Image (spheres, grey):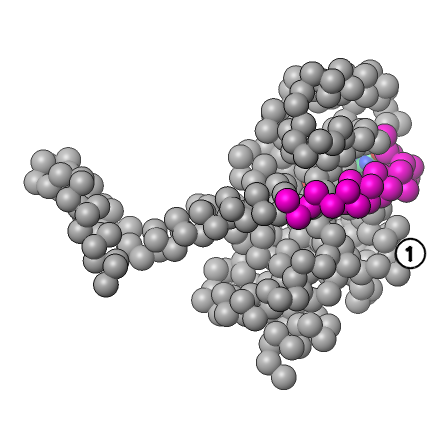
Amino acid sequence: MDIAQKITSGDTRSLARAATWIENRRPEAEPLLKELFPRTGRAMLIGVTGSPGAGKSTLCDQLTRSLRAEGKTVGIIAVDPTSPYTGGAILGDRIRMQHHHSDPGVFIRSMATRGWLGGLASATTEMTMLLDAAGFDTVIVETVGVGQDEVEIARLADVTLVVMVPGMGDDVQAIKAGIMEIADVFVINKADQPGAEKLERELKSYLTLSHRPYGWSPKIVQTVASDGRGITELLDATREYHARGTSRSRAADIWKIRLREMLRERLLDRFPESAFAAAGREVADRKRDPYSILHDWLAANEK
Ligand SMILES: Nc1nc2c(ncn2[C@@H]2O[C@H](COP(=O)(O)OP(=O)(O)OP(=O)(O)O)[C@@H](O)[C@H]2O)c(=O)[nH]1
Ligand SMILES: [Mg+2]
């Protein structure tokens, strides 16, 4: 059996190995993903994003419990832009999710991203493809919604949940516009704390003013992830959005963007950093003009 067959037949060790290939940008990943591609497109991809500490991991854990209770399998990718590989936040995620550890129906993977120079959205997309092909019914991607990269990542999901918290200056104005726009469902977590109703009112008035793509006005769900309150409603709202079937037109939009990025990455990969350094000096010294350099590079690539 080759590794693709092992992965689709549920071999967790092969799955973990392939995940490492993707994370380390190993050349083995591409032929594998190419082989697995026909098996993708079945899982429901849920993106969970929001401020640090908003309760995203706790929510993912609760969603996983509910889905497991229905007999659904779940793959979780925790993208962590701040921690080194052995960092506390990842450890925190692991601890919060550890009661799923012995469950073969749950696969959890943390991707630490400190020091990455890009390609984060690519690697995350590939990771979701891998888990999708491996047969997980639901794949959840948790990211901290702080930068453009995270917006990109959240955009790859079929359904994006944006998690907010009342009374933490986490009001509508303070949240990055990019994040507000990608929300399919707003989660007001920590609704056990004061200010949840106020935040919901603010969100509602924001939504009446904003233009939403794909003709959907996002649902707002209040949750207390730490005790499981609101999780059923959250799962219902998530499924309701998914059932509308806009995922496919959104997927087409996303792949259009992704293909551009992939082409750019491919092209850039053909030129070593040293080539840019040398050419940069030549241009600065007025030895060559930038246009002829580009012309030569592109001509050399056509061969
Ligand atoms: N009071 C209250 N605390 C909560 C709730 N949900 C989560 N917490 C707590 O909030 C803290 C942060 O929760 P996490 O799930 O780690 O939050 P996160 O958004 O994943 O955090 P990062 O991944 O570090 O950005 C933990 O101590 C949780 O127990 C809630 O609904 N109410
Ligand atoms: Mg977390």
Q: Relative to 220, is 272 above or below? A: below
Estimate the x, y position of residue 162 in percent, counting from the top left: 71, 34
Q: Residue at x 72, y 59 (%)?
A: 42
In the depicted view, which residue is nearer to us: 45 or 215?
215
Estimate the x, y position of residue 40 in percent, counting from the top left: 65, 62
Q: Is residue 81 visible?
A: no
In the displayed structure, does residue 229 sit left or right of residue 164?
A: right
| Residue named by callout 1 | 69
In the displayed structure, does residue 179 sit left or right of residue 9?
A: left
Mark 1: which secondary structure?
A: helix
Q: Residue at x 18, y 39 (%)?
A: 290
Q: Quadrant of residue 129?
A: bottom right
Q: Is residue 39 visible?
A: yes
Estimate the x, y position of residue 189 in percent, counting from the top left: 81, 31
> So how many labels did they put on this image?
1
Magenta region: which residues?
222-249
